[in-house]
Amino acid sequence: MGHDSSVEPVTDPPMASSPATFPIIVRGRRTPLDYLFFLRPVLLVPVWTIALLGTVAASPHAPLGAGRWLILFSQLSCLAGGIYTFNQICDVESDRLNRKLHFLAAGIISPRAAWVFTVALDCAALVGAACLARRYFALTILSIGLGIVYSAGRKPWKNRPGLALGANALGHGACVHLLGILAVTSSLTLPWTLTLGYALAVGAVYLATTVPDMPGDRATGKITLAVCWGGQRAMLLATLLVLGAIACAGVGRDWYLAGASFVSLPFFTGQ
């Protein structure tokens, strides 16, 4: 990620629950690019897209002004980024075993720096929300709260399969769509099927991502539906959720969601 120093492999004694080969440790000065990718920017694209479609649903013929668009996308980036970085702080051991998201596991970003960055992102998200609308601000607080209870606590929702699915569907699907709506209007009188469709679609994607993580999740005690049911049953449920999203999109005449869900369906049924 653009470090000035060399990369040296460090081997730890293998634990009973971990692979024999430990990921590399990167020692060197952190750069702004490290923090950019720590945000998981690829995952910000669907957040922006769902919020954008929320604004279209609320007012298809009255787009936001440039200044309000800038606030909206900046606020959403800080909000989602803070949730993602907090999750990485809490999931560092399972990420290490699953060999992904090495920023914390490999020492690229220190735990202290990760905490400071996460708090700064949350504060920026709240400031941005305050610039938009009162209900938008309240929904932002709810989203941050969902991110906290999902990843942290004595019994985090990530280890409670049904709640984990619900938190992802609600937080990254329904709430983001509603944030897009509230950026345009304070009214929430649109058909509920519009927002439900996005919740189902995001829930399906969440289930699909838990399947390849099963080995590391088992080793660290993280309980997902894929761990409980096995990969095939988890993918079957994900397929049903995609079909539900297509149905909701049809009822609400959201052809964007209907098209995206239909195109993605073979990736779920082919597992």
Image: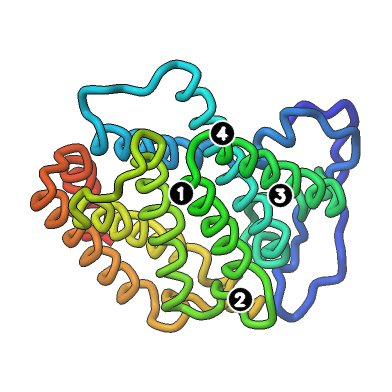
Q: Nearer the viewer, mark 1 or mark 2?
A: 1
Tell me the SS state at disc 4: loop
**What amino acid is at disc 4?**
Cys
Q: Nearer the viewer, mark 3 or mark 2?
A: 2
The image quadrant where one finds the C terminus is bottom left
Alpha carbon separation for disc pair 3 and 1: 36 Å
Q: Which mark is residue 131?
A: 4
Residue lying at 9% horizontally and 52% vertically, measured from the top left: 251
Tell me the SS state at disc 3: helix
Left/right placement of residue 2 relative to residue 52 reads: right
Name the outermost residue toward the top: 66
Q: In the rendered structure, which disc, 2 or 4, sits on the residue that comes first in sequence? A: 4
Residue lying at 25% horizontally and 64% vertically, measured from the top left: 241
**What amino acid is at disc 2?**
Pro
Total marks shown come to 4
Residue assigned mark 2: 156
Alpha carbon separation for disc pair 1 and 4: 11 Å
Q: Which mark is residue 135?
A: 1
Residue assigned mark 3: 102
The answer to whether one can see residue 24 in this image is no
Q: In the rendered structure, which disc, 1 or 2, sits on the residue that comes first in sequence? A: 1
